[in-house]
Amino acid sequence: MKSIRLFLLPFSLLYWLVILLRNWFFDIGILKTTTAGIPVISVGNLSVGGVGKTPIVEMLIEKLSVRLQLAIVSRGYGRKSTGLVVVSDGRGHLSPVRISGDEPAQLAGKYPRVIVLVDEHRVRGARKAMELGAEVILLDDGFQHRYLHRNLNIAVMTAEEVIQGDWLLPAGKRREPMNALKRSQLIVVSRCIDLENFYLAQAKLERWNKPIVGIQTTLKRIRNAVSDQEWGLKDLAGKRVVAFSGIGNPKSFEDVLAQARMTIAHHCIFSDHHWYSDKDITALTSGRDKWKADLLITTEKDSARLQEHFGGFLASEKVLVAEIYQKILSGEEFLDDIIQKALASCE
């Protein structure tokens, strides 16, 4: 594996030159940035793969949606459509999950009063959000999308990524080098094991002189995929489960399930944003029997992609969904203060 990465290093150098040139074009104004006219808060990351951005977007929704009309603008990775799609107009309209993408569909279903749009051209998406009455835009996965000006740029990195380091694509998983953190106003360290783990990561980030928030992924509840009936964690302790997921970081799902003290008999891992076929469903059902498991369990993001199977597979099988939230270990005062400053900057 290391030899392959070393072989790819020259390509990483070429990639770095392209990124350097692109960012320079934005810095000197050759590539233009458009200002929306309302506050834009971007949540993004330096690396490919799952770092826990969506639960952070949810945390921001819960902090702001009580008093403001929010809109989420996303590219909608993995969707079976192109162009602008109004996933939710904030008034009950929902587009089909295959058209909207899994994460936007998940957010629209969970927060029906929030406007949710997907568009590969985020400036166009932001304009549509304003037409629909948005007062604040949350730009999901927008760190590299510099065409839309943001009043608050949040960079998310996992504690493991910060502590261990990585290389640029294709030798590693980094989209940009670490000095891209200069563009952020806040760094969020996700998936911290504990405070000590956060402090190790914080020490490596201090040279960027940015406010740093540490968060820990925590199991919120486990529910039935169709009925929404909640299962007590005590009742699930010791149960054998077959987990299945198509997310950027499947190991993080296993870590969450460990909090419920379930026994993972097997984990069926699919590619990120995987759309489940009838063949997959058959394999999961037989896999539960093969591994002598009591239950099947998946993520919220995967359950969004399983909606079309609600009438068959999910109705007849005991399929559970693990919901998570982000517990702030350190720096909540930084987060609240910088959000207020971003909102005030457009007044």
Image (cartoon, helix red, strand yellow):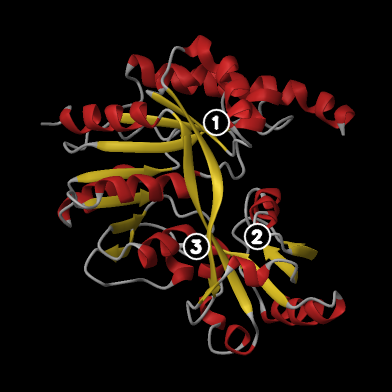
Q: Is residue 262 left or right of residue 48?
A: right
Location of residue 27 in the rendering, given as x and y in whole percent from the top left corner: 37, 16
Task: Report if residue 52 is visible in the image.
Answer: yes
In the rendered image, which quarter contains the N terminus? top right
Location of residue 196 in the rendering, given as x and y in whole percent from the top left corner: 62, 26
Looking at the rendered structure, the secondary structure element under dot 2 is: loop
Q: Quadrant of residue 286?
A: bottom right
In the foreground, 45 or 35? 45
* Mark earlier in primary sequence (1, 2): 1
Determine whether label 1 and label 3 are within 8 Å by CB. no
Looking at the rendered structure, the secondary structure element under dot 1 is: loop
Q: Is residue 32 left or right of residue 321?
A: left
> What amino acid does circle 1 point to?
Leu
Residue at x 51%, y 80% (from the top left corner): 226
Q: How many neighbours does mark 3 have within 10 angstroms: few (below 14), some (14-19), or many (20 or more)?
A: many
> What amino acid does circle 2 point to?
Ala
Task: Report if residue 149 is visible in the image.
Answer: no
CA–CA distance in space, label 1 to label 3: 21 Å
Q: Which residue is mark 2?
A: 260
> What amino acid does circle 3 point to?
Asp
Location of residue 165 in the rendering, given as x and y in whole percent from the top left corner: 68, 23
In the rendered image, which quarter contains the C terminus? top left
In the foreground, 75 or 251? 251
CA–CA distance in space, label 1 to label 2: 31 Å
Disc number for residue 227: none
Which is closer to the viewer, label 1 or label 2? 2
Residue at x 37%, y 37% (from the top left corner): 42
Q: Is residue 36 above or below residue 89?
A: above
Q: Which residue is mark 1?
A: 46
Q: Quadrant of residue 85?
A: bottom left
Q: Which residue is mark 3?
A: 102
Q: How many neighbours does mark 1 have within 10 angstroms: few (below 14), some (14-19), or many (20 or more)?
A: many
